[in-house]
Amino acid sequence: MEPAVVCNNQSNGDDIIRWFEDVSENAELVQTQTLRRILELNWGVEYLKKWLGDVEINEVDECALESLYTSLVPLVSHADLEPYIQRIANGDSAPLLTQQPMTTLSLSSGTTEGRQKYVPFTRHSAQTTLQIFRLAAAYRSRVYPTREGGKILEFIYSSKQFKTRGGLTAGTATTHYYASQEFKIKQETTKSFTCSPEEVISSRDNKQATYCHLLLGLFFSDHVEFITSTFAYSIVQSFVTFEELWRDLCIDIRDGSLSKRINLPKVRKAVLDIISPNPKLASKIEAACKELEDLDWFGLVPKLWPNAKYVYSIMTGSMQPYLKKLRRYAADVPLVSAEYGSTESWIGVNVDPCLPPEDVTFAVVPTFSYFEFIPLYRHKQDCNVAVDDFIEDKPVPLSQVKVGQQYEIVLTTFTGLYRYRLGDVVEVAGFHRGTPKLNFICRRKLILTVNIDKNTEKDLQMVVERGSQLLSKSRAELIDFTSHADVVNQPGHYIIYWEIKGDVEDMVLGECCREMDASFVDHGYVVSRRSNSIGPLELRIVEKGTFKKILEYFIGNGSALSQFKTPRCTSNNVLLSILNLCTIKRVYSTAYA
Ligand code: AMP
């Protein structure tokens, strides 16, 4: 069986769904074949030789191969493979991780683990991207059919591709994808074209690109079939920008001109070649915006893009906090949560696009990689345990996962990662035929800890959700948040930073802060708060635009806008100094007083 169904112009949505139903039905067998395929393709590379020696894999039967492989090759993290990847980046052309020479490396986002990592990227990576996009599109079109030849308003951004010391091309996985054949093939086979030309997507100036995406999206407003971005954050940010700039956009639509803020010659030419004066459309948009302003932009999507069938983006995990705002913009236009994957490998597809993002699960695609799952158990509520986030059990193959159990995902990929711990925690929600459907829970790493307390990103999100509900009393809303565990001052305490829209009385902020402090249910935290070995939670309100500054800081350091996820906890000194300089108010919790 092929590891990936490579694009085929003739195949339509039904073909790819039939293919997926088939591999899901036989997921156990497909996984064994996938592992064999990966090992055959990369047989004899330095890394595998080190662990497998001279074992003749062709002579080992399928079941034995899986247990042989998992007993001889260790579980690793990125740090363990870094020396190999670094040698590749420096130009060592010996077969280290893959037999095929590596020509490209991807940068995984620096905002999940605090720094950027190189990850191998091959043609297979772009092919699986195309494949999962086509598969997901096929499932979506069953529920929300779109018109052939329609347009997609895509808030997408490629970042810089550069050469490593050894001459390999490096950049983010999305950048490689947008530059690949596969991206063009996707548009042709799905017969839906992005509103913006290539020059805008690859302009590398995110502000200018956002303006152009909005302008072209409005210019083609009647033809836009759906609105999308990689992460929901980008759509929200773009509409926030729209709230500020709609008047300028209307001028450009009326006159067929382009604002002076777009100063990149290639981008100017590409956009001006597309647009032409359209006073009627400009007046329509202007009238709509005046109405929308009175409604605090509720229903912006259906008002401006009347034919949009849905909004499609990653809305799970750390994107969940943006849902509320996105829902306001989308009103009755459905929000469809996009697929689950990482720079290392695609993982699962949303086969139930009509489910609300909160309930979405991802059916693992068993041809993409060989997947293992490390069972994770929370510590019993005993505050004396060592500070580790979970207790682990032995990894199990995909066919042995259990519904309701949480796991960390381990990948063996076609791109040369062997038993690689991804660091994501997922929960098995059920099965799609024979393949598990996963709920994304959080990044594994603990984020907030002062002493014996252990709070994950998910815990923080729930707490912030509860605290921010009280903001509705003041008709204000939370724009973004992050946190920091202050262990310098004794007793240590949590600081949560909020950027809010609207005026909020100090008394309400005090209630929000108290509510958050009281909502951390982790036993270590509760015990420490009661004994005052952790001090009262501090809520710091930052001025408007602070999180935009943070985004700009990351982009300035080489992160891609399409990959950006606001770090929900930070100890980064630059970030902390931005946050602290922008702090306009401090409130302390009175819980546990
Ligand atoms: P990157 O390091 O930029 O490749 O980002 C990959 C990470 O983003 C994954 O390991 C997840 O933690 C997160 N991620 C990707 N897709 C989703 C999704 N659909 N839902 C939640 N988190 C996701």
Image (tube, helix red, strand yellow):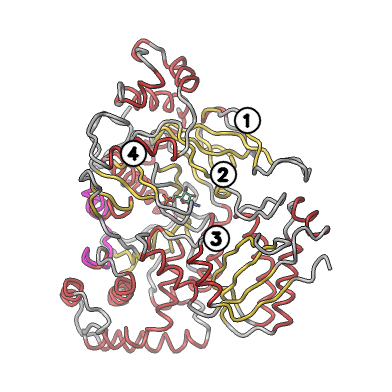
Could you tell me the amino acid type at mark 2?
A: Val
Local SS, label 3 = loop
Q: Depth check: 298 or 321 in front? A: 321
What predominant SS class does the magenta segment belong to?
A: helix
Local SS, label 2 = strand
Query: Whole-Å distance between the Cαs marked 1 and 2?
Result: 14 Å
In the image, residue 126 sits, relative to residue 401, either above or below, namely below
Q: Which residue is mark 1?
A: 393
Q: Mark 2 vs mark 3: give the one in front.
A: 3
Query: Whole-Å distance between the Cαs marked 4 and 1?
Result: 29 Å
Residues packed near mark 3 inside 10 Å, few (<14), some (14 to 19) or many (20 plus):
some
- Choose top left, top right, bottom left or bottom right for residue 280: bottom left
Q: Which mark is residue 470?
A: none
At x 36%, y 27%, the residue is 47
Q: Depth check: 15 or 189 in front? A: 189
Please provide percent x and percent y for residue 123: 26, 40
Q: Which residue is mark 4?
A: 85
In the image, residue 392 sits, relative to residue 161, either above or below, namely above
Query: Whole-Å distance between the Cαs marked 1 and 3?
Result: 29 Å
Q: Which residue is mark 2?
A: 425
